[in-house]
Amino acid sequence: MTKKLMVGKVAVGGGAPVSIQSMCNTKTDDVAATVAQIHALEDAGCEIIRVAVPDEDAAKAVDKIKEQIAIPLIADIHFNYKLALMCAERGIDALRINPGNIGGEEKVKAVADICRQKNIPIRIGVNGGSLEKHILAKYGAPVPEAMVESALYHVRLLEKFDFNNIVISIKNSNVPRMMEAYRQLSAVTDYPLHVGVTEAGTYQMGLLKSGMGIGGMLLEGIGDTIRVSLAAEPEKEVEAGYNILRAVGFPVAGPEVITCPTCGRTQYPCTEIANEVEKRLQGCKKSIKVAVMGCVVNGPGEAREADIGIAGGDFALMDDGKLKLDSLPASCQLLEGDLVVTSGLGGYLPPDLVIGSVSELRADDSDTSNYAILTPAADLNGLTEVCIIKSFEIVS
């Protein structure tokens, strides 16, 4: 297990829940715009936010931003150690800075000292596209071994000055390289790991790469905090982050909508309804699973594992108060008046529940199977009470 540290009030590592991060795309010295974007990210569920600090104007905005937001703020700094000192003095919650890129040891010591005094974590952020020249010359390419060596090089610079409040990220746009780098790094350090895929490409490709890379690492037990880097509004990164956590089985507040991909058996606008359900559930914090069922093949199984099931079908017979029993083999010998009951096979429904009686048997358009028109045993339009059977045992 990794070490535990605090980024503001958010625990990272040491078995703490995986936190979701994002980064503002506003000019940091535009305090109003930056605060507005952070508020939108807070509403989306972002737990830690990072801002770029390229100059003194941006650094001077840190305290003004901090006093108006609720989530921890990280300053992203390159090359200029004085900006790190300014941000630390203005109450920054964490720094993203690589000590090997800010000059001599006295500058590294100055940053380490103030961060130690103020309990400010430092994230070392290795990127496959910006490795140190001596490491890149040694390996010839940003291979996993090169990225790990770069990360440990920066770690040693901080440890030299008795600083170990460290988080490490080791990102690459190549998913297999990124994953192998994290595997190698996690084997040699217990510092918390920030996991992500950098420069992942367009929105769709970014989602795909991040789902594979971040999700794959989390399934291997690697990763304490994540950011999904997308060429989109930051709120989309947060949404994607939670979807990745949900997909790999982490407990996530909020609903999960599942639906089938649809096929020729689907008899109603399943996809459109699923999208509308997801839209209307935005902002809901209740952890529920909603299944929008596509057809009789997968629908019952989808619904059985869900808290809420939504079903649809062929409404052509509804006005006549009839039901359709389809996909019957051509050899099926049903007669008018035959009673249709549940079989209990498959375990989805108890056996011997009366559905209705056969009114008519018809051949489908392909002449390869039949379907029956049923008169339901109950008046479905006049129901006043419904009994829901939550569990049952089938006795053979």
Image (cartoon, rainbow, N blue to C red):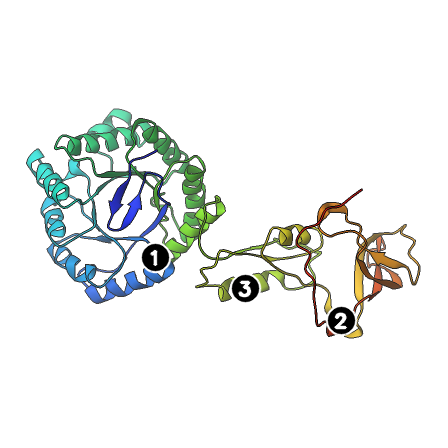
Could you say which quadrant of the image residue 370 lies in? bottom right
Could you say which quadrant of the image residue 389 lies in? bottom right
Q: Position of residue 229 (x, y in %)?
A: 35, 49
Going by the numbered disc 3, the residue's amino acid type is Val
Q: Which residue lies at the image location 16% right of the left edge and 62% below the top edge?
A: 64
Of pointers 2 and 1, the one earlier in the residue sequence: 1
Disc 1 versus disc 3: distance between alpha carbons? 23 Å
Q: Are marks 2 and 3 in contact (CB under 8 Å)?
A: no
Q: Residues within 10 Å of mark 2 (few under 14, many from 20)?
A: few
Residue 339 visible at all: yes
Disc 2 versus disc 3: distance between alpha carbons? 23 Å
Regarding mark 1 in the picture, which secondary structure is present there?
A: helix
Q: Residues within 10 Å of mark 1 (few under 14, many from 20)?
A: many
Q: Position of residue 252 (x, y in %)?
A: 44, 51
Of pointers 2 and 3, the one earlier in the residue sequence: 3
Regarding mark 3 in the picture, which secondary structure is present there?
A: helix
Q: Residues within 10 Å of mark 3 (few under 14, many from 20)?
A: some
Going by the numbered disc 2, the residue's amino acid type is Met
Task: Using the image, tell me which numbered label, if any, was put on residue 18.
Answer: none
Of pointers 1 and 3, the one earlier in the residue sequence: 1
Disc 2 versus disc 1: distance between alpha carbons? 46 Å
Task: Using the image, tell me which numbered label, if any, was put on residue 234.
Answer: 1
Q: Is residue 152 left or right of residue 222?
A: left
Q: Position of residue 132 (x, y in %)?
A: 21, 33
Going by the numbered disc 1, the residue's amino acid type is Pro
- Circle 3 residue: 277
Q: Residue furthest left?
A: 106
- Above or below, 252 against 136 in this view is below
Q: Are marks 1 and 3 in contact (CB under 8 Å)?
A: no
Q: Position of residue 34 (x, y in %)?
A: 24, 62
- Circle 2 residue: 318
Could you say which quadrant of the image residue 110 lies in? top left
